[in-house]
């Protein structure tokens, strides 16, 4: 970029625009850490919860889900705290991406509390909300696998309508593995390349 | 047709900085520097020119006790970039084979 004062030809201008925009789109993407962390936790909790609900003689109080915030919240806070210290950066795309997940983080405990207070299974509304957050993330980051991930998680919520509550945690684990973990891996890979 | 192109954007660094800001809308100075591969001094000069033209706004602030310069594309900047891109497209359409 040393010849910044020499006039570009139209061909060179077009090349600069395309190269910069392509690189920018790749670089502003999140590294997928949070998707991977929470995806692994949700899949693990879902499978444990499903096993406990199927195993004979076990009184499943759904304690497996309680592990999620206990591990996930401190790791997330620690990761973000360290990142903020090392990376001084601000851009609108990541700001909107963070706001989507902040809204999700605020809505989720409220939604679970309301469902439990009304003796309703919270799985479906959680999946609908997760699908919405994934969809918005996909749109904000222009990353299509996240939009497909949202469709899978929404489909999981619909599938819960036709199945017994005992299967919901397994459906959630599968939907999150496909709709959350895979886009997370792809996002991490896209960031590395 | 070539003469109609915005001469301010016919500079590699200014055009790269504006293209990046078209994607992210706002970014700090160091990020733009990394994205464009420019030196601090050169980028600083070109950022000033874009600011003088009203294409970007520059906000100087602090974060974690470090100075932070945020550049934000303005509506006039977006309009100028879109107009520049439209002119380029017309140029290539009308260019004889």
Image: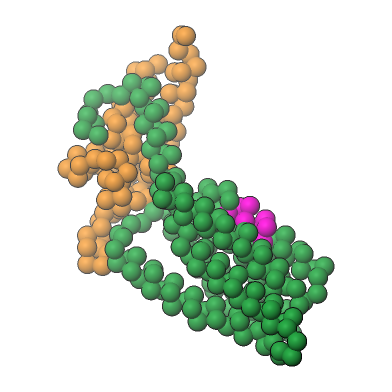
Chain colours: A green, B orange
Q: Say whether residue B68 is magenta.
A: no
Q: How many marks?
A: 0
- The answer to whether A79 is drawn above or below residue A192 in the figure is below
Residue drawn at x 46%, y 63% is A33
Q: Is residue A71 left or right of residue A56?
A: left
- The answer to whether A115 is drawn above or below residue B86 in the figure is below
Residue drawn at x 34%, y 18% is B3
Nearest to the observer: residue A185 or residue B32: A185
- Residue A178 in percent (x, y) is at 63, 59
- Residue A167 in percent (x, y) is at 75, 73
Q: Is residue A98 left or right of residue A50?
A: left
Whether residue B78 can be seen here: no
Residue drawn at x 76%, y 68% is A160
Choose top left, top right, bottom left or bottom right for residue A152: bottom right
Q: Say whether residue A151 is magenta.
A: yes
Q: Is residue A14 left or right of residue A71?
A: left
Residue drawn at x 43%, y 74% is A75
Task: Name the dominant secondary structure of the magenta segment.
Answer: helix
Query: Hey, which residue is sitting farthest right in the picture?
Result: A162
- Residue A101 in percent (x, y) is at 52, 65
Q: Which residues are magenta?
A: A146-153
- The answer to whether B68 is drawn above or below residue A66 in the figure is above
- Residue A133 in percent (x, y) is at 58, 62
Nearest to the observer: residue A150 or residue B93: A150
């Amino acid at each position: 970029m040393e010849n910044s004062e020499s006039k570009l030809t139209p061909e060179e201008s077009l090349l600069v625009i395309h190269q910069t925009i392509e690189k920018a789109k790749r670089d502003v993407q999140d590294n997928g850490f949070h998707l991977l962390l929470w995806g692994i936790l949700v899949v693990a909790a879902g499978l444990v919860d499903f096993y406990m609900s199927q195993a004979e003689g076990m009184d499943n109080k759904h304690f497996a889900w309680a592990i999620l915030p206990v591990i996930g919240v401190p790791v997330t806070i620690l990761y973000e705290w360290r990142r903020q210290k090392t990376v001084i950066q601000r851009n609108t795309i990541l700001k909107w991406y963070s706001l989507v997940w902040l809204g999700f983080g605020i809505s989720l405990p409220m939604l679970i509390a309301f469902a439990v207070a009304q003796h309703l299974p919270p799985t479906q509304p959680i999946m609908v909300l997760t699908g919405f957050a994934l969809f918005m993330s996909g749109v904000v980051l222009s990353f299509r696998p996240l939009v497909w991930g949202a469709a899978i998680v929404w489909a999981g919520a619909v599938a819960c309508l036709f199945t017994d509550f005992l299967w919901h945690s397994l459906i959630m684990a599968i939907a999150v593995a496909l709709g959350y973990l895979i886009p997370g891996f792809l996002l991490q890979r896209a960031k590395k390349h | 047709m070539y003469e109609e192109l915005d001469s301010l954007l016919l500079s590699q660094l200014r055009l790269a900085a504006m293209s990046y800001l078209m994607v992210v809308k706002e970014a700090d100075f160091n990020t733009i520097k990394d994205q464009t591969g420019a030196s601090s001094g050169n980028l600083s000069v070109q950022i000033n020119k874009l600011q003088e033209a009203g294409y970007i706004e520059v906000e100087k602030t602090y974060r974690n006790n470090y100075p932070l310069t945020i550049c934000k594309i303005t509506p006039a900047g977006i309009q100028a970039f879109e107009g520049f891109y439209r002119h380029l497209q017309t140029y290539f359409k009308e260019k004889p084979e």
